[in-house]
Each structure stands twice: as structure tokens, then as C-alpha cells.
């Protein structure tokens, strides 16, 4: 328990130092942009593939159940896929994927920099290392993850439509009637809240794990795994509380 | 000039530095030597501010950094250049960007001024065609030279080198040693070198501090060190039977 609070304190201290005043704003904005491209463009293909098929499989499964019940109109599937993608599937699945891809990458990159004394080299120069190495990553993720989630929602809805067309479950008009029916902007707000929180959690936890690594290659590997596991668990718990309090 | 007084440092309950004092003068290559685990790297890390000593003082030209605020300490850090054991070059940046990084971060120089300064520093370490290469494309010796170029790009008053010859062949090691000495004398810097390479001691050791088990055991010049005939320093210098024989024969 004491160890948990020590780690929590150390995490909070490091993250608070990450948002100190930059030595030179131009260098920090350049680094933030570079990180945003890395996280955003680098993750787009995997997010696109997974969200399209998540939308598709949701549509297929609901079509299967609706056909069995035979009481619910098929155009509802568009509504369910949209709602499911916006509220849960797009933000959560995207975040878990990104924790695996971006989180492990960040932890191992910072861990390697720590072991190879690159972080010490920044320190000696007088650079505020948490602010320069962690701040831009967290800021980039907070900006880019919501964008990726919005793309995931669109592709998931399109995936649902594509699966329906191939399976002949409904017509295009029926599906998009369901997608547009009873749209609530508050759902999008919830999605954005989750995306921002997940972006923050996955990068800050991964940065903490990588930045504080000690030892060698084995410890870098462990910290990378811990970063993914820990950030995924925290995100799932936060996901519950957001849903519980905001819905 | 850098003066350390009675530096103590422990990790958990293990006392690594037991009260080290020494003076490192301007324009000289000051060497800290000692066996692995003797405390020389910890001494250097305390001096550059990467570790906080438990007690004692560290003065850079009379400015005591141990009692300074973080903000003031940052000012001194900008007067420090450091060459790390493995080079510690930033993997994602080219050689040119590595050397230019401190200028980008801390100066308002124009692009042309920065380019000239970077080219001058790379030229000074005899690297003229590597600007666009990444650290992964360089040999060990080249990495060290880029490290030196990056360390001197801000015209530091103090240069720290941690094991500058580790992993290098003897000939390249001598080239690096001579480069460090030339730069030290040219810019009248206070240079402190951590090493256990006896070639460096004999070649550039204007002032040598021997640390043994966390204590300063001996201090003198590279000329004086050859007169040592017994004790821990003797065992350190003439570590192998071959060297002991060589010295015995040289006497006759």
C-alpha cells in the first residue's frame, strides 16, 4: 500500500513538472507537432482497420439477433451501431489499441533514453526534461486521440453499412435512417470526454514508466509491458466512472 | 576552477562517497581515476548536478551549487559541457541537429549563425562530412567526437568527460585524449575526466585524483604517479604482472 502511494506521488510530481513553463516555446511546439504526427498518422491504419470491422461485426450480430426475435425493425441496427460506436466502442477500443501501440513505444523510447544517458544529456544542458520529453507527448495525445476516435466512429458506421449490404440485412436507406434517428449531441460530448481522458492516461502512465526505468534492456521491456497493462486497466476503470456519472 | 569539499553520498544505507575533497584548476585536464565501483562516476554526477550529495559543498568559481535554487543552478548548467561514456547522442536527430540542439533551445541565433557554429565545432573535432548522418550510422570514435562537438558548442567554462575512451581502440583513444586536451587549453576550460585508462593518465593527466573505496586516496601529476611504489594506487596502475615486470626491468 505504501509503495502504491509512493508511486502515485512520484507520478503526480513528474506529471506536474511536465507542464512547467517552456524554455523556448518554439522548440516545444515543434516537438508537440512531431509527436502528434507520430501518434496520429502512425496509428491511423490500425484504428481504421479495427474500427471498420468492429462496426461490421456489431451490425452482423444485431442482425442475427433481430432476425431471431423478428419483432424489431432492421433499421434500428444503424441506430445501435452509431450509439455503440460513439459511446463505447470507438473511444474504448481505440484507446486500448493505442495503449498497446503508442504506450509501449513511448515507454521503451524513454526507457532507452534513460539507460543510454540521453535524458542526463538533456539535464546537463539545463533542459527541463519532464517538460520537454513528457509534456509534448501528453499534449499531442490529448489533441490527436479525439480526432482518431471521431474517424473510428465514422469508419465503424460505414463498416456496419458495408456488412449489411454484403449480408443483405437492410437497405442503405434503412441503415442510414437508423444512423440519423434520435441523434443526441450529448453522446458525442461523452465520447470526447473519454477520448481526452484516455489520451492523457495512456501517455502520462507510459511516460512515467519509461522515464523512471532503472537497469537495462530487461527493465525496459518490463516497463513497456507495465505501461500497457497499467494504462489499460486505469482506462477501463475511468471508462466505468465516466459512464456512471455522466450518463 | 571547481572545488569540492568533503562530499558524501550514500545509496540506501550504503555509503559510496565518504568525504571527497579536491580542487580542479582551469586550463588543465583533471583526471579522476579509480577502480570500477570506487565512486568516481558518483563524484562526477554530484558535480554536474545529476545526483544530490548528502553533505559537502561543490563550488564553481566560488559559486556553491549545493545551496543554490534550481533556477540559479540551471544557469551554471549552461556553462557545463559533458561528454558521456556512450556519447548519449539523441537517436532521432542527425549529427547536425544534435550539435545544434543547445543553440536551438537556449539562444536566439539565426539559422545561418547556428549552421556556422555547428560546422565550426564539427570541424574542430575533424568531422566535416557527417552533418546529415544519424548516430546509428557512426562509429564509436565518431560518436565521441560528435559528443565533444555538442559539449563545446555553447562555449562552456567547464567540460566533464565520463570514460571518454571506453570502447575505443588505443589509437582512436589517443586521438580523443589529444582532442580534449587541445580544446581544454585553447578555451582555458576546467576539464574533468573520469577514466581508468592509464594511457590517458600518462598522456593528458595534468592533475590526477585517485579515488579508492569512496575516499580520495592520492592526488598529484602524471609525472609523480610513476614514483609510486606500493599501496592501492600502485596495484591500480600496475594491475597486471606484465606491467609490474615491465616497470621492474625499466628500473634496471
Image (spheres, rainbow, N blue to C red):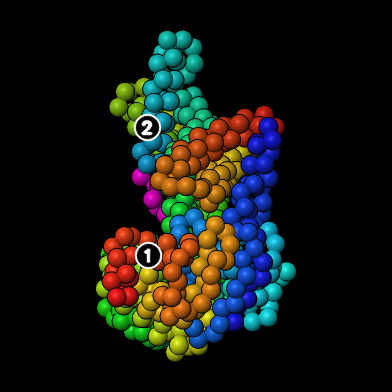
Q: Chain of mark 2?
A: A
Is B88 inside the magenta-drawn segment? no
Q: Residue at x 65, y 36 (%)?
A: A4
Q: Give the residue drawn at x 49%, y 24%.
A: A76
In magenta stretch: residue A39: yes
Q: Tell me what residue is drawn at x 54 percent, y 85 percent.
A: B26
Indicate the secondary structure of the residue bearing disc 2.
helix
The magenta segment: A38-45
10 Å neighbourhood of mark 1: few (<14), some, or many (≥20)?
Answer: some
Q: Is residue B144 left or right of residue B32?
A: left
Q: Residue B133 location in percent, x, y?
A: 30, 69
Q: Is residue A59 above or below residue B40?
A: above
Mark 1 = which residue?
B238
Q: Is residue B158 above or below residue B9?
A: below
> Could you tell me which quadrant the C terminus of chain B lies in?
bottom left
Does the image show residue A66? Answer: yes
Q: Say if B199 sits above or below A143 in the image.
A: below
Residue of label 2: A53
State whether discs 1 and 2 lie on one chain: no
- Magenta residues: mostly which secondary structure? helix
Q: Nearer the viewer, residue A151 or B124?
A: B124
Q: Position of residue A175 (x, y in %)?
A: 43, 29
Judged from the image, the secondary structure of the residue bearing numbered disc 1 is loop
Amino acid at each position: 500500500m505504501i509503495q502504491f502511494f509512493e508511486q502515485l506521488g512520484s507520478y503526480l510530481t513528474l506529471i506536474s513538472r511536465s507542464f512547467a513553463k517552456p524554455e523556448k516555446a518554439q522548440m516545444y511546439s515543434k516537438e508537440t507537432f512531431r509527436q502528434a504526427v507520430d501518434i496520429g498518422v502512425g496509428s491511423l491504419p490500425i484504428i481504421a482497420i479495427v474500427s471498420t470491422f468492429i462496426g461490421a461485426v456489431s451490425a452482423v450480430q444485431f442482425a442475427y439477433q433481430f432476425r431471431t426475435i423478428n419483432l424489431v425493425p432492421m433499421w434500428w441496427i444503424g441506430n445501435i451501431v452509431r450509439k455503440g460506436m460513439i459511446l463505447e466502442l470507438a473511444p474504448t477500443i481505440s484507446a486500448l489499441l493505442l495503449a498497446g501501440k503508442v504506450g509501449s513505444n513511448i515507454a521503451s523510447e524513454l526507457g532507452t533514453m534513460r539507460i543510454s544517458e540521453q535524458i542526463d544529456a538533456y539535464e546537463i544542458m539545463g533542459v527541463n526534461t519532464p517538460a520537454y520529453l513528457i509534456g509534448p507527448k501528453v499534449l499531442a495525445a490529448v489533441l490527436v486521440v479525439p480526432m482518431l476516435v471521431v474517424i473510428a466512429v465514422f469508419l465503424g458506421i460505414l463498416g456496419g453499412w458495408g456488412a449489411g449490404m454484403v449480408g443483405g440485412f437492410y437497405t442503405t436507406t434503412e441503415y442510414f435512417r437508423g444512423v440519423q434517428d434520435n441523434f443526441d449531441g450529448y453522446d458525442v460530448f461523452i465520447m470526447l470526454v473519454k477520448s481526452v481522458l484516455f489520451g492523457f492516461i495512456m501517455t502520462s502512465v507510459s511516460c512515467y514508466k519509461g522515464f523512471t526505468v532503472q537497469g537495462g534492456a530487461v527493465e525496459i521491456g518490463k516497463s513497456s509491458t507495465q505501461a500497457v497493462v497499467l494504462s489499460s486497466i486505469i482506462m477501463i476503470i475511468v471508462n466505468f466512472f465516466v459512464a456512471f456519472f455522466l450518463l | 576552477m571547481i572545488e569540492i569539499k568533503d562530499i558524501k553520498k550514500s545509496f540506501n544505507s550504503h555509503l559510496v562517497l565518504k568525504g571527497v575533497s579536491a580542487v580542479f584548476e582551469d586550463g588543465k585536464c583533471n583526471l579522476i581515476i579509480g577502480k570500477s565501483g570506487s565512486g568516481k562516476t558518483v563524484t562526477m554526477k554530484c558535480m554536474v548536478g545529476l545526483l544530490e550529495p548528502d553533505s559537502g559543498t561543490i563550488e564553481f568559481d566560488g559559486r556553491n551549487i549545493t545551496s543554490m535554487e534550481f533556477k540559479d543552478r540551471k544557469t551554471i548548467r549552461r556553462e557545463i559541457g559533458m561528454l558521456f561514456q556512450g556519447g548519449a547522442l539523441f537517436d532521432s536527430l542527425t549529427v547536425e541537429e544534435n550539435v545544434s540542439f543547445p543553440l536551438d533551445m537556449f539562444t536566439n541565433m539565426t539559422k545561418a549563425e547556428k549552421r556556422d557554429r555547428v560546422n565550426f565545432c564539427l570541424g574542430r573535432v575533424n568531422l566535416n562530412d557527417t552533418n546529415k548522418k544519424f548516430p546509428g550510422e557512426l562509429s564509436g570514435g565518431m560518436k565521441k567526437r560528435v559528443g565533444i562537438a555538442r559539449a563545446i558548442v555553447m562555449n562552456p567554462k567547464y567540460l566533464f568527460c565520463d570514460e571518454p575512451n571506453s570502447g575505443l581502440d588505443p589509437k582512436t583513444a589517443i586521438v580523443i585524449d589529444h582532442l580534449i586536451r587541445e580544446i581544454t587549453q585553447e578555451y582555458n576550460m576546467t576539464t574533468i575526466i573520469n577514466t581508468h585508462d592509464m594511457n590517458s593518465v600518462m598522456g593528458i593527466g595534468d592533475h590526477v585524483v585517485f579515488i579508492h573505496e569512496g575516499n580520495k586516496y592520492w592526488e598529484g601529476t602524471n609525472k609523480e604517479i610513476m614514483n609510486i611504489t606500493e599501496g592501492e594506487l600502485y596495484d591500480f596502475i600496475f594491475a597486471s604482472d606484465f606491467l609490474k615486470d615491465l616497470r621492474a626491468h625499466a628500473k634496471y
